[in-house]
Each structure stands twice: as structure tokens, then as C-alpha cells.
Image (spheres, helix red, strand yellow):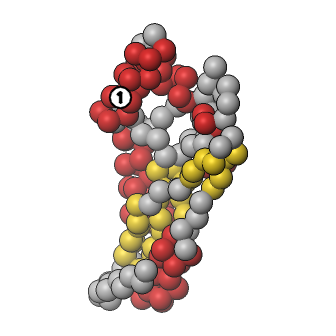
Amino acid sequence: MRRRFRCPRPSTGWVSLFLLSTLIAGARGDEPQREAAPDSEARPQVSLAVDYGPHGIRANALCPGWVQTPMADQEMDRLGAARGLSRDEAYALAGRPIPLRRAASPGEIASVCLFLASDESSFLTGAVIPADGGASAVDAGTLPFLRGYLD
């Protein structure tokens, strides 16, 4: 799939553009399997960085991990009910595969967004920023599907 981006040329200063994305993971039987989207779809920030960098436009992709939201709370309530756990205990159990052992707060993800939009990231372009507590380093999305992992 081809996407076109039309970015205005900044008259003064620099512009920061960042894309929200996700890391895609799946499981096949007992084997964790990472699936990747085609490069053109998974990494538009690279094309944008190359094409628009000379015009002062920075492009990066933010890949947030698990975030504690009302929807995540509902999932933890279901997990807790199934296992006789409180919501906090369910979050602790579900966070075990993640190196930081927890979900992010919405404010933590917002802070990464603010950093990417700030002058502090003025030399950062074409990058993928996984704000996931280390989950992508261990493929945490598929670990719970391994037999006996959460038991």
C-alpha cells in the first residue's frame, strides 16, 4: 500500500512530525512469532525523514506499548475475575513479561510525545521510538501464550 504525505515547507525554524504506530506480534502454537508489515508501511518515517529533512521537517514513529487506560482496566478486571485477583494483582501478573514489570501511564506516553515535538529532539529523525517498558526487547506480547508461562 502506498501512502502520500504532503508537508508544507516551514517558513522559519524546524517542524517535528511523529507517527503513532504499533509493533505487531503473533503466536503460532507454542512458538512466538514476530510479524512485520512491509517496509513501506511499517516505516513511513524513514521516507519522510529523507524527503523532508532538508526542509527542516523531522519525522519519527512512536510505538507505545501497554498503557493503563480504562480499556486496559477492563481487561485486568476480567483477568482478575478469572484468577481470583484484584485489579492491581492482575496488572502485576500481566506485567511480568515486561522488563519494567508494568504498564505505562498515559502521562508517560504523552511525555515521549512532548519530547519528540520539542527542540530537545532536534537531531532525531527517521527513528522508531518504542515506549514500551522494554516489551519489544523480550517479545512480551507473545510470552503469555507459551504453555505454563503465567501459571
The one nearer the camera, 21 or 143, is 143
Q: Quick check: 134 above or below 54?
A: above
Label 1 neighbour load within 10 Å: few <14, some 14-19, many 20+: some
Quadrant location, the C terminus: top right
| Count of marks, rendered view | 1
The residue that label 1 is drawn on is 73
> In this rendering, does residue 131 appear at all?
yes
Q: Quick check: 4 above or below 80?
A: below
Find numbered disc 1 in the image and state the secondary structure of the residue it sits on.
helix
Q: Amino acid at mark 1?
A: Asp
Q: Quick check: 19 above or below 44?
A: above
Residue 20's x, y, as percent?
Answer: 40, 60
The one nearer the camera, 17 or 140, is 140
The quarter of the picture where residue 58 lies is bottom left
* Residue at left offset 36%, top offset 85%: 4
Residue 76's x, y, as percent?
Answer: 41, 25
Residue 126 is left or right of residue 108, and the answer is: right
Farthest front residue in view: 29
* Residue at left offset 47%, top offset 21%: 90
Q: Quick check: 115 above or below 45?
A: above
* Residue at left offset 67%, top offset 30%: 147
Quadrant location, the N terminus: bottom left
Residue 88's x, y, as percent?
Answer: 44, 18
Residue 117's x, y, as percent?
Answer: 39, 63
> In this rendering, does residue 125 appear at all?
no
* Residue at left offset 57%, top offset 50%: 26
The quarter of the picture where residue 21 lies is bottom left
The one nearer the camera, 22 or 117, is 22
